Amino acid sequence: MKTVNHLGTDPIGKLVPRIAFPSMLAQFVSVLYSIVDRMYIGHIASVGDLALAGVGVCGPILTMIGAFSSLIGVGGAPLLGIRLGEKNEKEASRILANAFLMLVSLSLVLTAAALFLTRPMLMAFGASTVTYPYARAYFMIYVSGSVFALLSTGLNQFVICQGFASEGMKSVLLGAVLNLLLDPVFIFVLHLGVRGAAIATVLSQIASCLYVLHILFGKTIPIRITFGGYSFAIMKRILTVGFTPFLIIAIDNVMIIAMNAVLQQYAPAGQGDSFITCATIVQSFMLIITIPLGGISGGTQSILAYNYGAGNSRRILEAQKTIIALCAGFTTLMFLVSNAAGTLFAQLFTSDPQIVSMVVRAIHISTLSVIPLGIQYEIVDGFTAMGCVRYSFALSFFRKFVYFTALFLLPRFFALENIFYVEPISDLIGPVVSMIVYWTSIQKILKQREEAVRLMHTKKCIKNSSYQKRLFFSAEFSKLSPEKNSFFCFC
């Protein structure tokens, strides 16, 4: 695999897969952090199902905390890519310096806040008196190490956006493989239960974090972490661009929290925890689809950002066609997997036949519209890569609005088992609207950028020409031979 990808010159047909596949694989493996934990936890003797329900309550809260890494990482990486496309490495370095400071500061504040609010958050988001002890045990340890998770995830975006997709993949693989090895040791050999799962995850995240820091402080990457050059204007721009991906992840987890709360509210007496266990397993399966899908559409943002900075519309459109094809191909494959392997997947988490049956039906329902979801992801992430946050925010928010509307209406008119139809409803309506907006706006956006780049080059040319004319009349210029002044290029 090629280590460095030239984002502005490599053939699109080869460049997109070289960026997309490592990013997709890295994100797929990252899902194993939560999937493997839940698999082992679900098989803890006598308390597996309750422990799994408790950890399921923690999941969306922890992912919401992790969303702040996207606020900075996905917010800053496209800006850095655009500056590289403009050949402005000094400004690119300042963006990374500001992003690093923001990630460190945010991670410390979030850790303190989460530890202080542990009980009210867990109880409000679906824990019962029975599952709370398991949720708290996992949550307290995981959150204590969340600084490493935020730094590794957020900074990894700045590795990928510089064309080092394989290095970004290695950092995620390191943590995931380590988690796979440590989980059974801490959970079963050392008999630490859910605490062991959390300890294994934190140690794995520390390893990933150290690897990313080694890359970004090393000498193999063009733009490295430096100190100084801090600017509120740069920080504001990072937050502006990153707000949409942050909101997407945050609202996705609010959706899961809302789902758990609705299930507890409408479930027959004594069955609320069983429904949440089912929903936790279904959410795990959906993560196997959405996280790698985000790896394809998010990882390839570097291509779009670089060429947007360079004003190369042709390469942007060509890249987006290829990315959409990859996204749609992946979601089609996962649709087939959901129908063929739903039972096997459910049995990885629980041996209760009733819960297995519920899970299989819920997976089949939840993936009915998963194919167009791939197109939605690329359109939203594509707009974000080009800094067009007004489009990406609006389209993402609309899909979430459809989801919440269906979530609160369906249980009022239909049996609770049908609540899982909220996913295909939003996954169909959202992409349709996104495609309409994309087709009617993309040409205008690209033409405006081409004009901006031409103006930028004109200003530079005028500036250089003015300098050259001053130099022409100086005594120093008259002493130069024709060969030595041949590098001058007059407009």
Image (cartoon, rainbow, N blue to C red):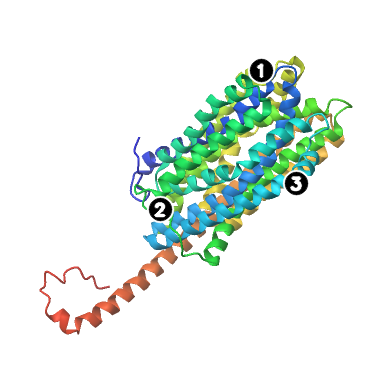
Q: Are marks 3 and 2 in contact (CB under 8 Å)?
A: no
The answer to whether residue 278 is visible is no
Q: Nearer the viewer, residue 233 or 189?
A: 189
67 sits left or right of 418 in the view: left
How far apart are the two marked residues, 1 and 3, measured between alpha carbons?
34 Å
Quarter of the picture containing the C terminus is bottom left
Read off the residue under disc 1. 347
How far apart are the two marked residues, 3 and 2, measured between alpha carbons?
36 Å
Q: Is residue 226 above or below residue 141?
A: below
Q: Is residue 128 above or below residue 124?
A: above
Q: Residue at x 80, y 41 (%)?
A: 124
333 sits left or right of 267 in the view: left
Lower sequence index among marks 3 and 2: 3
The answer to whether residue 408 is visible is yes
Quadrant in the rendering for residue 312: bottom left
Q: Is residue 24 above or below residue 46?
A: below
Disc 1 crowd rating (10 Å Cα; few below 14, some 14-19, many 20+) is some
Quarter of the picture containing the N terminus is top left
Residue located farthest toward the right when viewing the structure as drawn: 269
Read off the residue under disc 3. 117
Read off the residue under disc 2. 224
Lower sequence index among marks 1 and 3: 3
Kind of residue sitting beneath label 3: Leu
The secondary element bearing badge 1 is classed as helix
